[in-house]
Image (cartoon, rainbow, N blue to C red):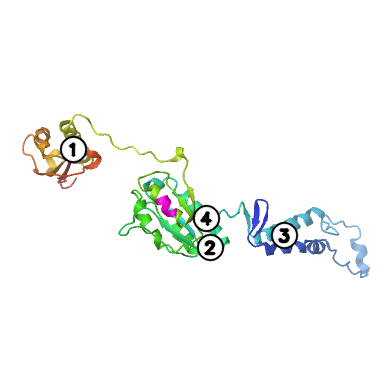
Amino acid sequence: MFALGALSFAAPVALLALAALPIIWWLLRIIPPAPKRIRFPAIRLIMGLTNPEESSAKTPLWLTLLRLALVSLLILGAAHPLLNAGNQLTGTGPVVIVIDDGWAAAKNWTQRQNSAANIIDQAERAGRAVAVLTTAPGEGKSRALESLMTADAARQTVLALKPKPWAVDRKAAAAVLGAIEAGGGAHVVWLSNGLGDEAAGDFAAALGKLGAVTVLADPAGALPNVLPPTLIEGGIVPEARLAMDNLYVGLEAAGVGWEDVVKCTVFLADMVDYGPFNEVYLEYFPSDPPARSAMSVRGLAFDARVEVECIAAVPEGS
């Protein structure tokens, strides 16, 4: 690679064609041979005529310069110019690209793919192998882990990735880092979603064992906002009413009501709350309540005391 300041050329040999510009100049400016004069007696018939269109004896200077500029641009294009193409990768081993592909990365996913593609381009110019590791669990498998591959194969892998609608699992991702045959001297680029978790520190330390680590993350103002739901205060009774009200919203959206419910399942964090919940439950089903089952479970979402699910029959024709 040949560089002139911020401009680099991936195929600098093509620049040698610029040395031929003087010859091209001479060819463009060359004057065609003079016409051969042949006497024609009837020439007097057309002596008084004038030709409204006249051709120049030689190519105009502006046209020659324009043609030279076009030839120069063709030569520069053949040299594959690159702006700010300086290699920012360290080491001599493979390049490992780690991508957080959970829900938090969906907002700027195209930008992440472009960043990964730029890193792959640098690795390709340096003749280095590439590995791609995602941190979000996939469907039916732990995650997408690619062993060392060529830059072109890595580019196709990155373009095929899609953000997943769940959180990343960096602890599980760290457990498979050993499968990457880095061989020392690797450069790791972590495209982070910018959100920390308990495993982030250990994960960064595991990446550091492969080689130098560069972390690319969105600025603080561009990070997604995580707003966990707030539970109503006051104990099981207001929580039960909130659960039933939310349940009705779902029923109404489906075009049914309480009278269409045929089965309810109640999950309680503590069976001691069964009595107070039952009183609230009967407010919504004062007569002919549907079949119901209740059970005690541990670890309801967001430390809730109660959770209710139901099955409703949609009227025929609705």
Residue wearing tag 3: 71
Res 72 → quadrant: bottom right
Around disc 3, counting alpha carbons within 10 Å, would you say few (fewer than 14), some (14 to 19), or many (20 or more)?
A: some
Task: Classify residue 161 as left or right of residue 212.
Answer: left
Q: Amino acid at mark 3?
A: Val
Q: Which mark is residue 128?
A: 2
Of badges 2 and 3, the one in the foreground is: 2
Of badges 3 and 1, the one in the foreground is: 1
Q: Amino acid at mark 2?
A: Arg
Is the stretch drawn in magenta largely helix, strand or loop?
A: helix
Q: Secondary structure at mark 3?
A: helix
Which of the two discs, 1 and 2, labels the residue nearer the N terminus?
Answer: 2
Report, in whole angstroms, how far the alpha carbon at label 2 lies from the one at label 4: 11 Å
Mark 2 touching mark 4, by CB under 8 A?
A: no
Report, in whole angstroms, how far the alpha carbon at label 3 lies from the one at label 1: 77 Å
Residue wearing tag 1: 305
